[in-house]
């Protein structure tokens, strides 16, 4: 039975591959619907996991409700303090600079400003 389903699936995919729109239209379709496809599949995955582990999740929630409530309140509080805006994240470059300084000169220093050495 599985072989028949696999054969029918391969035949359907082969037929669809012959009648699909051109590459230009597929790229446009992917650009405008890709996010929604990923969102829907993620949502379906969450529903499946919830159905699969409902009893275990219920016991975990009942055992750790105080910590979950506290973390939710803190997340909402932090979100209110620092709303989402454009931010420059320079932590990685600072870490790289400190790592290089520690390796080369054995000091934890980093440059925060540069000199114009050509003047």
Image (cartoon, rainbow, N blue to C red):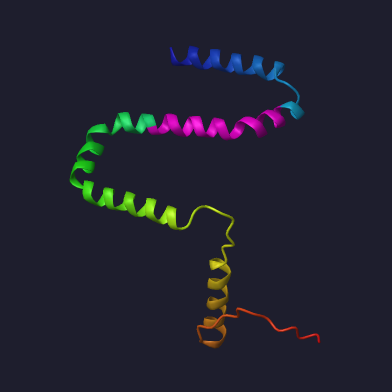
Residue occupying the point 55% across, 30% down: 37
Q: Which quadrant: the C terminus?
A: bottom right
- Image quarter for residue 22? top right
Residue at left offset 65%, top offset 32%: 32
Q: What residue range appears in magenta?
A: 26-46
**Residue 58: quadrant of the picture:** top left
Foreground pick, 6 / 29: 29
Task: Report x, y in % for residue 45.
Answer: 42, 32
Query: Where, quadrant-wise, is the N terminus in this rendering?
Result: top left
Q: Is residue 6 left or right of residue 86?
A: left
Residue 111 image point, x, y percent: 60, 80
- Of residues 56 and 3, the one nearer the viewer is 56
Q: Residue 48, position in %: x, y?
A: 37, 29
- 112 up-or-down from 82: above or below: below
Looking at this view, name the residue that lies furthest to the right. 119
The structure residue drawn at horizontal position 56% and vertical position 54%, both measured from the top left corner, is 85
Say whether residue 45 is magenta. Answer: yes
Is 14 on the left-hand or right-hand side of 57?
A: right
- The secondary structure making up most of the magenta span is helix
């Amino acid at each position: 039975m599985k072989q028949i389903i696999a054969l029918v699936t391969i035949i359907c995919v082969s037929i669809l591959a012959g009648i699909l729109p051109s590459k230009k239209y597929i790229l446009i379709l992917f650009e405008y619907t890709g996010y929604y496809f990923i969102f829907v599949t993620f949502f379906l995955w969450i529903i499946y996991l919830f159905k699969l582990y409902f009893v275990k999740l219920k016991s975990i929630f009942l055992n750790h409700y105080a910590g979950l409530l506290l973390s939710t309140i803190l997340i909402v509080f932090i979100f209110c303090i620092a709303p989402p805006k454009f931010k420059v994240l320079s932590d990685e470059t600072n870490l790289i600079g400190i790592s290089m300084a520690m390796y080369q000169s054995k000091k934890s220093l980093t440059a925060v400003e540069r000199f114009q050495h050509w003047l």
